[in-house]
């Protein structure tokens, strides 16, 4: 829905200090906030919306997700709820997609056991199969799939290329590490539509997203989806290459892969190259070792304002202080604790357990930290994020690090921070600002008491109603 809008009787959060304390009217004109004040008079043919005391917020931001993977996940076989005993039947009974492949996600090596090409061959009956580990770091492909990808020729040469894992005899095991970009090109087919992803995020009140996928091919898919109008959100990408006319270009994503840690000098040189081009870096770090390597590389390369660590899944308080001293931001994922906290606890070394998925401890140490989803690997619902960060409850009910709980208002501020400054001052509602807004059906205090996406009444991006019924 396009056109000018007058929102009457809203709570503005956060608003200019002079306008706090009562219900206000907000006029949207030509995609921006044109006027704020009490009892504004309707003008012309603008849409007149009675908010009845509902809160009006800047649109919510997801500082780390994977848009194309979200779309692909929706059309894949989800193994996350399948037992080890049921895995073979689920894979063998799955139908191939438009590209001729059976595509499965949510594989968990601890729950399902080890997978390789030989295991999948028993189940697949001549159909190419690719199965993604729940972390997103690993694909397992059967022999038919490897042949279609041309991997046999690579393996025959004894080359470990493109993330292809080889056994001692130089034979491909079917396990492909961090090979998404190559795999996507090799499989071919049409890129997935992102229309449903954009609509879902809009219904959750999300107006700003940072796509954390590092390869340029995915950034091109995202940019084309923005151009086609499939994604109404403001989009920032972290890929090595991007079209700045269609999406904003954020920090450069670098992956410190736990299965193959990079050389310190090489990592530092990549950081220096990004900085020389004016781009901060966003470094994927999950383990304590990866974080230590990242800090050492940043010290060697020199920092740039905007440098950040993604995930920071294991960090002791000394490491948190080192991050703060260097001004390195952290983007964390509270819903992963709610979804997988019991698994993290069981699989983590005892000495690492007190340092799992810090949030409150990072803030107390002076680290500028912000929440995100890591969807589709985490929950894209920002209201679930508010609950998860505040409660820190695992699926079994265990409180994972009670001292890491964060007040809901603080988490909300993180969701309101700009894409280029996660955890910085929240965007505000003021004249001249873009009309990227979310209107709730209740006051903010009520909405935050029991956070739930059902409170979202309407979402505006550039003044356009992209979700909700405000007629």
Image (cartoon, rainbow, N blue to C red):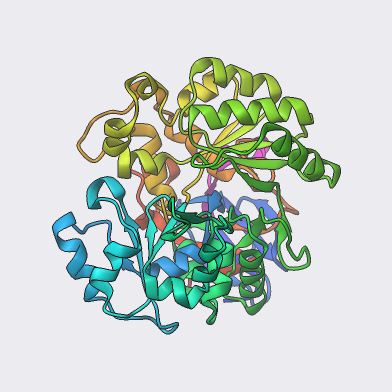
Which residue shows up at 58% across the image and 58% down it?
Answer: 161
Q: Position of residue 29 (x, y in %)?
A: 70, 66
Residue at 42% x, 23% y is: 355
Q: Is residue 136 magenta?
A: no
Q: Is residue 469 visible?
A: no
Q: Which quadrant would residue 276 be assigned to in this image?
A: top right
Residue 77, quarter of the rendered image: bottom left
In the depicted structure, whether residue 175 falls above or below residue 4: above
At a point 16% along the width and 62% down the height, the residue shown is 86
Give me the residue at 57% from left, 63% from top.
157
Image quarter of residue 407: top left
**Is residue 238 shown left or right of residue 335?**
right
Q: Please tell me whether residue 12 belongs to the stretch shown in magenta.
A: yes
User: Among all residues in the image, which is located at the extreme top?
Assistant: 318
Residue range highlighted in magenta: 9-23
Residue 122: horizontal and vertical position, in percent?
24, 69
Q: Is residue 398 above or below residue 461?
A: above
Q: Position of residue 40 (x, y in %)?
A: 64, 58
- Looking at the figure, which quarter contains the N terminus? bottom right
Depth check: 173 or 269 in front? 173
Q: Does the image show residue 256?
A: yes
Q: Residue furthest front?
A: 169
In the image, farthest residue toward the right: 276
Question: Quick one: 232 or 318, which is closer to the camera?
Answer: 318
In the rendered structure, the answer to whether residue 340 lies left or right of residue 99 reads left
Instruction: Report how many numbered discs are placed on residues in the image.
Output: 0
- Up-down: is 188 above or below 205? below
Percent coordinates x, y for residue 459 in the rendering: 52, 62
């Amino acid at each position: 829905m396009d056109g000018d809008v007058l929102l009457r009787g809203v709570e503005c959060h956060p608003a200019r200090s002079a306008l706090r304390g009562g219900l206000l009217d907000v006029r949207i004109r030509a995609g921006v906030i044109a006027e704020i004040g009490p009892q504004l008079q309707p003008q012309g043919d603008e849409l007149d919306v009675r908010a009845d005391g509902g809160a009006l917020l800047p649109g919510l931001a997801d500082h780390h997700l994977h848009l194309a993977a979200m779309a692909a996940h929706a059309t894949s076989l989800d193994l996350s709820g399948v037992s080890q005993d049921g895995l073979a039947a689920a894979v063998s009974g799955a139908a191939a997609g438009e590209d001729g492949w059976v595509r499965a996600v949510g594989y968990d090596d601890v729950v399902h056991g080890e997978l390789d090409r030989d295991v999948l061959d028993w189940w697949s009956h001549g159909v190419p199969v690719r199965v993604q580990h729940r972390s997103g770091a690993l694909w397992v492909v059967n022999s038919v799939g490897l042949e279609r990808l041309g991997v046999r020729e690579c393996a025959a040469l004894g080359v470990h290329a493109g993330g292809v894992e080889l056994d001692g005899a130089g034979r491909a095991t079917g396990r492909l590490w961090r090979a998404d970009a190559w795999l996507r090109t090799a499989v071919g087919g049409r890129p997935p539509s992102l229309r449903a992803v954009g609509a879902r995020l809009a219904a959750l009140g999300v107006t700003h997203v940072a796509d954390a996928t590092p390869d340029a091919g995915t950034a091109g898919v995202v940019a084309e989806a923005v151009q086609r109008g499939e994604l109404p959100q403001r989009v920032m990408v972290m890929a090595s290459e991007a079209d700045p006319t269609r999406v904003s270009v954020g920090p450069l994503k670098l992956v410190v892969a736990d299965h193959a840690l990079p050389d310190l000098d090489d990592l530092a040189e990549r950081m220096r190259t990004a900085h020389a081009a004016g781009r901060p870096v966003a470094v994927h770090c999950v383990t304590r070792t990866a974080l230590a390597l990242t800090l050492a590389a940043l010290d060697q390369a020199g920092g740039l304002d905007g440098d950040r660590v993604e995930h920071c899944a294991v960090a002791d308080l000394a490491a948190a202080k080192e991050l703060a001293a260097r001004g390195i931001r952290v983007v964390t994922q509270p819903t992963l604790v709610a979804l997988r906290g019991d698994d993290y606890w069981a699989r983590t070394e005892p000495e690492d357990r007190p340092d799992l998925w810090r949030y409150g401890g990072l803030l107390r140490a002076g680290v500028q930290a912000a929440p995100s989803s890591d969807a589709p690997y985490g929950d894209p619902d920002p209201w679930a994020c508010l609950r998860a960060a505040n409660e820190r409850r695992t699926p079994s009910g265990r409180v994972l690090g009670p001292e890491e709980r964060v007040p809901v208002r603080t988490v909300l501020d993180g969701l309101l921070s700009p894409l280029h400054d996660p955890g910085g001052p929240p965007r505000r509602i003021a004249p001249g600002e873009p009309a990227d807004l979310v209107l709730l059906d209740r006051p903010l205090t009520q909405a935050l008491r029991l956070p739930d996406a059902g409170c979202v009444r309407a979402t505006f991006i550039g003044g356009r109603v992209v979700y909700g019924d405000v007629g």
